[in-house]
Image: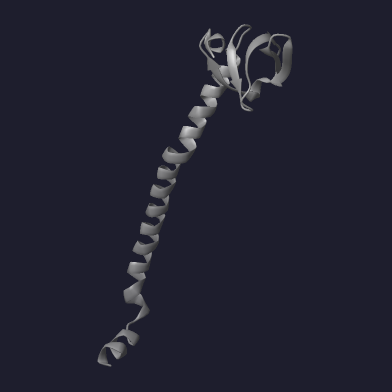
Amino acid sequence: MAFISTAMAATPSTTTGTQGASSLSTLVVLAVFFVIFYFLMIRPQQKKAKEHRNLINNLSKGDEVITSGGLLGIIKKVTEDYMVIELAEGVEVKVQKQAVNTCLPKGTLKSI
């Protein structure tokens, strides 16, 4: 009971210093979480997007590719935003460049 009376009798000036330190430590913790979030989530996504842009910019006629829909084919024609992919002999499909997921090594489709 005596402890409660002592705690209630504490003046606000004695707790002000701990509130300032508490808010500063909270700010530091938030900054640390943001830095961790940046390096674990944002940075890898930016790196992956840059690699995909480089892949798309380097596509040329004759490359063997896999689209995001799972189609495998050989590029027959490349324009600024689209390309024509030959899926089988006489079967050609026009797709967006962004739909290309992977560029395969030459001769992969013949071995499948």
Q: How did the renderer colour the structure? A: one colour
- Place of residue 10 in the rendered image (x, y in percent of width and height, measured from the top left): 32, 83
| In front of the other: 46 or 71 | 71
Q: Is residue 100 above or below residue 10?
A: above
Q: Residue furthest left?
A: 2
| In front of the other: 16 or 60 | 60
| Residue ID at (66%, 20%) | 97
Q: Residue furthest front?
A: 112
Q: Is residue 44 above or below residue 87?
A: below
| In front of the other: 9 or 112 | 112
Write down the quadrant of residue 38 in the picture. top left
Q: Is residue 44 above or below residue 27?
A: above
| Residue ID at (34%, 62%) | 21
Horizontal arrangement in the rendering, residue 102 relative to residue 12 (left or right): right
| Residue ID at (42%, 53%) | 30
- Place of residue 82 in the rendered image (x, y in percent of width and height, measured from the top left): 71, 17
| In front of the other: 104 or 107 | 107
| Residue ID at (51%, 22%) | 51
Horizontal arrangement in the rendering, residue 71 relative to residue 2 (left or right): right
Horizontal arrangement in the rendering, residue 14 relative to residue 79 (left or right): left
Horizontal arrangement in the rendering, residue 30 relative to residue 4 (left or right): right
**Mark count:** 0
Query: Which quadrant does the N terminus fall into?
Result: bottom left
Write down the quadrant of residue 29 in the picture. bottom left
Write down the quadrant of residue 49 in the picture. top right
- Place of residue 112 in the rendered image (x, y in percent of width and height, measured from the top left): 54, 14
- Place of residue 4 in the rendered image (x, y in percent of width and height, measured from the top left): 31, 88
